[in-house]
Image: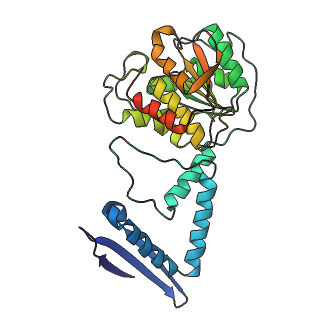
Amino acid sequence: MNIKHHRKGSVGQAHRRDVISDHHNDDNFSKIEARNDADELEMGNEEEWIRDKENRERGNNNNGKSMSILLCFVFLFGVSIGNSVTFSTNNGFQPKHQPPVLKLFDVMHNHLSLLANKPVEQVSRREYHLGAVPTTRGGLTDSDRELLASIYFNSSSVFEFGLGESTHIAAYVGVPRYSGVDNDPVWIGKARDGAKMDHFRFSFADTGKTSDFGHPINDKMQKIPLDYQSAPLNNEYHAFDFYLVDGRYRVATACSSFLHAISRGGDMSQVLVGVHDWVSDRSYLFELTSIADVVHQSERLAVMRMKTNVSEHDIHELWKSHIWDRN
């Protein structure tokens, strides 16, 4: 095995490639290139880097080309169910480059995500009646329970921000695909044990130490918006029929629910987002009416559908204005 180090000059810094060559025989020669371009590539040299990579790829043997085609096919299969998502942050950071070839870790991750999120085909569906599941201190009224149970019974997929009695209702009516997040690990354990549904997926959002009802004690930690508002949805490759917002950061998570459904190709004329505690003393929630219409309502639960004249940009702007509002 011969290891060759090649350095190529660039503006301000050099780019290193380690080329590891393994000769099996005269007719079978493969190259594996490992490099640190992700950290070293400068924005000004991106086009040069891409051209250089394309030239190297033209020199691959037929086996290498076949593998690239296979990986591209797997990549397209794994992500074609959702549209591309463009990310931006307040500090203007943009990725230095997009990898032209999907790495095998990503192929693995896509496969496992699709496997984990596959709806259960054989699940018992039954209608809810008051008293069917134990009540909790989450604040659902009887009219909230009946409205929520009706929607859950007619939904094939549900996502919940905030776990509790609503999770037990989802389990009782037999939602085929369910995922939920909470920032209290004890509460997650209770919801999981009460649901008794092996296909239900639960995520823990690390917002640090919390007080009553999951309020972060230090709500300025930079990890909170990612862990609570985005990460739980990131591995969900399909839109949900219904998103329930009943935890923290309610305006922000309602916006992220709509954005997730759009990015995953959801039918926005059918996707619904429910917001609990829709009451006068939480009037800040009413800002959501700028992007969505209330189509169903009970005592403390409003169920919303995205307005037809609203764009992703409008939703994103509302999300940005509430990213740190923990209520």
Count of numbered badges drawn on the protein:
0
Q: Nearer the viewer, residue 100 or 106?
A: 100
| Quadrant showing the N terminus | bottom left
Q: What colour scheme does the image use?
A: rainbow
Residue 32 coordinates in the image, percent (x, y): 45, 74
* In the depicted structure, whether residue 93 falls above or below residue 202: below
| Quadrant showing the C terminus | top left
Residue 280 coordinates in the image, percent (x, y): 50, 9
Residue drawn at x 40%, y 33% is 225
Q: Nearer the viewer, residue 137 or 244?
A: 244
Residue drawn at x 35%, y 73% is 17
Q: Nearer the viewer, residue 311 or 137?
A: 311
Residue drawn at x 51%, y 61% is 104
Visible residue check, residue 19: yes
Residue 94 coordinates in the image, percent (x, y): 38, 51
**Residue at the extreme bottom:** 26
Q: Is residue 20 left or right of residue 181?
A: left
* In the depicted structure, whether residue 116 falls above or below residue 76: above
**Residue at the extreme front:** 309
Residue 296 coordinates in the image, percent (x, y): 66, 17
Q: Nearer the viewer, residue 217 or 57?
A: 57
Visible residue check, residue 181: no
Q: Is residue 17 left or right of residue 298?
A: left
* In the depicted structure, whether residue 50 falls above or below residue 92: below
Q: Is residue 269 left or right of residue 211?
A: right
Q: Quadrant of residue 33?
A: bottom left
